[in-house]
Amino acid sequence: MSGELFDMTAIAASGVTETSPAGAAVLRREKVMRQTQAAEDAVLAPEKPGAWSASVRAAFAVRIARLNGNDALAEHYADRITDDTASPLADPANDGSAQGLAAVVAFMDKVAAHTREVRAEDIDALKSAGIADADIVRLAELNAFLAYQIRLIAGLKLMQGAK
């Protein structure tokens, strides 16, 4: 049962194993780790995805991970992109114009990399681009979860003495 725990995204991406220095801490926080995985599943593949398919969400997750320098997490989410039209969104060099998502990509990048600079005008830009309120919330949820997950991975790596 604990082997399954160590296969969960955040734990696997951090390199923590059952026998590693941080392994005992993960076991003590098993409930939190399982809830983290459940949150990932809910955000990346929700029952009601709105405008953002699971593949688009995975592409944005790759993009966010790359913008935050987490290659292992980016690689994990890249495996979840099943739609070739979503793949270009994973590349931080792509501005989303070709997909008709320039405003969305600009928002996602700003939230992921320059969070303190996000303003009401950024939400207004999404609304002006025709993005529904519920879909704006979905974008924010995805970005918020990735921010948490990236920090969790960094913390687990620090507990192991990794840089």
Image: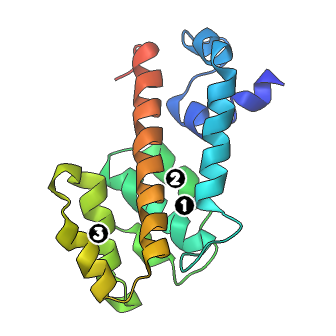
On the image, numbered disc 2 is attached to which residue? 75
On the image, numbered disc 3 is attached to which residue? 107
**Rendered-image quadrant of the C terminus:** top left
Query: Is 114 above or below relative to 119?
Result: above
Residue 57 location, x and y as percent?
53, 67
> Marks 3/2: CA distance?
22 Å
Task: Identify the mark nearer the N-term, 1 or 3.
Answer: 1
In the image, which is nearer the foreground, mark 3 or mark 2? 3
In the image, which is nearer the foreground, mark 1 or mark 3? 3
Q: Which mark is residue 78?
A: 1
Amino acid type, mark 2: Glu
Query: Is 33 above or below relative to 46?
Result: above
Residue 132 location, x and y as percent?
44, 81
> Marks 2/1: CA distance?
5 Å
Between 102 and 6, the residue placed more toward the observer is: 102
Query: Is 132 above or below relative to 108?
Result: below
Judged from the image, the secondary structure of the residue bearing numbered disc 2 is helix
- Label pair 2/1, CB-CB below 8 angstroms: yes
Task: Identify the mark nearer the N-term, 3 or 2.
Answer: 2
